[in-house]
Amino acid sequence: MSIDLAWQKILYATIDDAVSCAVEVTPPHDADLPYVQIGESSLEDFPTGKEMFCDVHTWSSAEGAHEVKTIQHQIREVLHASNHNGDGYNYSCCRELDCRVFRDTDGETWHGVQSFRVFASEV
């Protein structure tokens, strides 16, 4: 299994245990809100492993941004400064690099994006 797909599996399981809403990689078009979506990722090679980046999206139809911010806090609590192992890889020093919340272009839905960085190496 690729190192980034293995990280996606860890993200999914870790976030799913932490939040009270659905966690999706590819949400259906009619998904109930709120939900969390494992988003875009990229990686860079280094002699000792890889530096990986991943975005986590939170979607809500609540009256204000409080629901998205609450879910983002729950995600931050389980990912920031964490270490994980899985599928033959070690993921260390996970950090939240950025967190933002804004109205989606539909004018009704709140959209939160958190960007995380983690260092990965084979065990």
Image (cartoon, rainbow, N blue to C red):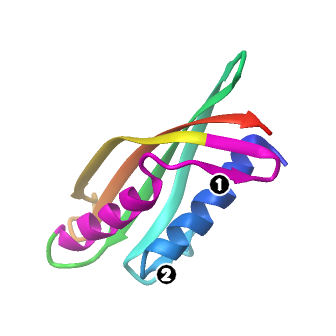
The answer to which image quadrant residue 73 occupies is bottom left
The answer to which image quadrant residue 27 occupies is bottom right
Residue in view at x 73 percent, y 50 percent: 5
Residue in view at x 51 percent, y 66 percent: 15
Q: Nearer the viewer, residue 98 or 47?
A: 47
Labels 1 & 2 near each other (Cβ < 8 A): no
Mark 1 crowdedness (10 Å alpha carbons): few <14, some 14-19, many ≥20: some
Identify residue type, mark 2: Asp
Q: Nearer the viewer, residue 4 or 110?
A: 4
Residue in view at x 54 percent, y 58 percent: 38
Residue at the farthest left position: 64
Horizontal and vertical percent position of residue 103: 22, 59
Horizontal and vertical percent position of residue 121: 72, 34
- Give yes or no for residue 82 being in the magenta stretch: yes
Horizontal and vertical percent position of residue 94: 50, 42
Residue in view at x 81 percent, y 53 percent: 87
Q: Is residue 22 visible?
A: yes
Give the CA distance from mark 1 to mark 2.
Answer: 23 Å
- Give yes or no for residue 46 being in the magenta stretch: no
Mark 2 crowdedness (10 Å alpha carbons): few <14, some 14-19, many ≥20: few
Residue at the farthest top position: 47
- Find numbered disc 2 in the image and state the secondary structure of the residue it sits on: loop
Image: magenta residue range? 65-91
Residue 8's disc number: 1
- Find numbered disc 1 in the image and state the secondary structure of the residue it sits on: helix
Asked if 51 appears above or below 58 in the picture, the reply is above
Q: Return the residue at label 2.
A: 30
Which label's residue is closer to the chain start, 1 or 2? 1
